[in-house]
Amino acid sequence: MKRTGGAAGRRPAPTPAGLPARRAALEVLLAVRRGEPFDHALARALGSLPDVDRRLAHELAAGVLRRQSDLDARLIPLVRHGWGNVEPSLREVLRLGAYQLVALDRVPTHAAVSTAVDLARSLGGSKAAGFVNALLRNLGGRAAAPSLAMDPAAHFAALYSHPDWLVARWLERYGQEDTVSLMEWNNAPPALVLQPAREDDVALEARWRAAGLEPARATLRGWLSPARRPADVPGFAEGAFIVQDPAHALVAAFAGVEPAMRVYDACAAPGGKSIALGRQAALVVSADRTLDRVRRLAQNLARAGSGREHAVVADALHPPVVPADVVLLDAPCLGTGTFARHPDARWKVSADALARLAQRQGELLRACADVVRPGGWLVYATCSLEPEENEHQVDALLARDGRFERDPGDTVSAELRTSRGDLHLLPFRHGTDGAYAARLRRRA
């Protein structure tokens, strides 16, 4: 006789709606805490999720990272035995639930709490589930931020979830209004911008209109993506465009590469600037120091390059080229101009890291200066807002190396340049990522 009862006859319980997206977001957060870059963790975790779950998972993971201080300030007072005694994975589950309750009006309270409880149960059983359920159902307002009058940096750092030490620097440099605007920019989802590659602006616009899309221009340069995923935009497979913020496209334009020039892009991955430079140059040697980064670089060059760009594995401290007409050093930096695009980055920066990077940038500049031909240009760039990584590096090179002088040219509007001619883009002023570049000519 066939048995119909008992565990053997039961069907597995259906997965609650929305749980796969929350599970993917949790996977991203745990990977980021282990040190993996946000974009890498996101790409792996999203896998084959349907679009609606992909979008939710991305929003949840990025939102938790952007608002971590605020979320923790609401959760910590509810933990009787101390936040430090909560398992790290359960902290992320609590942050995910709290973010939905605090920031996403469209997510019903029961959905936010029940999916967090399901995640907790999968990690730590019924005890963990009960703990998360109790905390989230008692979630209230955040703890009071430190007094503005007593400690402005701590006050705004708590309100906008940024490191205190960095906010203190920005307040001193930019003032309160611009610093708040900068942090608000960092806490908002960034625009997805497309730049011409194998097709120019006219051809791209015609292609998209023929596909029934309504293309819109981005701030300063490029196009707002007409689809959520670049791969879904007509022309992607053919390399008609690349994904690149206007700030980084302007750095490539600022370099002022002319036809027949030979270019060395010393820290080229993922390749956007090499592709832009290759539209004019006769040859671009696109280098980076690790094989994984060069593989990604080579893939992007193959998809959207002109064929004049060539990916190589090389350390910029030891340039693998003879003197070039243009050397671009897009130096490793804190990336404080791209916090909106990389929501995990703000929690990885430190004053010590700034000092170490500044030292390395100086070493890289010295090495790259030696492979600029007489009469050629050295272009130094970062996506940082910090002067130690930007104008201080250029000033130091000019002070010790009499072969070079500033020569900014006229390829970029004077409104985007400093009084000394350096390109300087600020998110709160220009509506783009933050970026800096200086162009130096080696005297003939």
Image (spheres, rainbow, N blue to C red):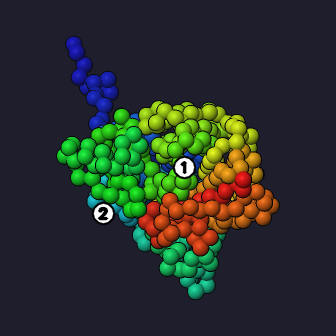
Q: Residue at x 28, y 24 (%)?
A: 9
Relative to 260, does residue 149 appear above or below in the rendering? below
| Amino acid type for the residue under numbered disc 2 | Asp
Q: Is residue 224 visible?
A: yes
| Res 100 → quadrant | bottom left
How dense is the environment of label 2, judged by Cα within 10 Å: few (below 14), some, or many (20 and up)?
few
Q: Quadrant of the N terminus?
A: top left
- Position of 53 relative to 255 (above/below): above
Name the spot of residue 76 as percent of width and height, x first: 53, 65
Which of the 4 image quadrants contains residue 31?
Answer: top right
Give the mark count: 2
Residue type at the position of mark 1? Val
**Residue 269 against residue 357 in the figure, above or below:** above
Kindly identify the residue that appears in the image at 61 percent across and 76 percent down. Answer: 173
- Residue that numbered label 2 is attached to: 105
Task: Say whether disc 1 or disc 2 marks the residue closer to the N-terminus.
Answer: 2
Rendered residue at 66%/58% (across/down): 440
C-alpha separation, residue under disc 1 versus residue under disc 2: 49 Å
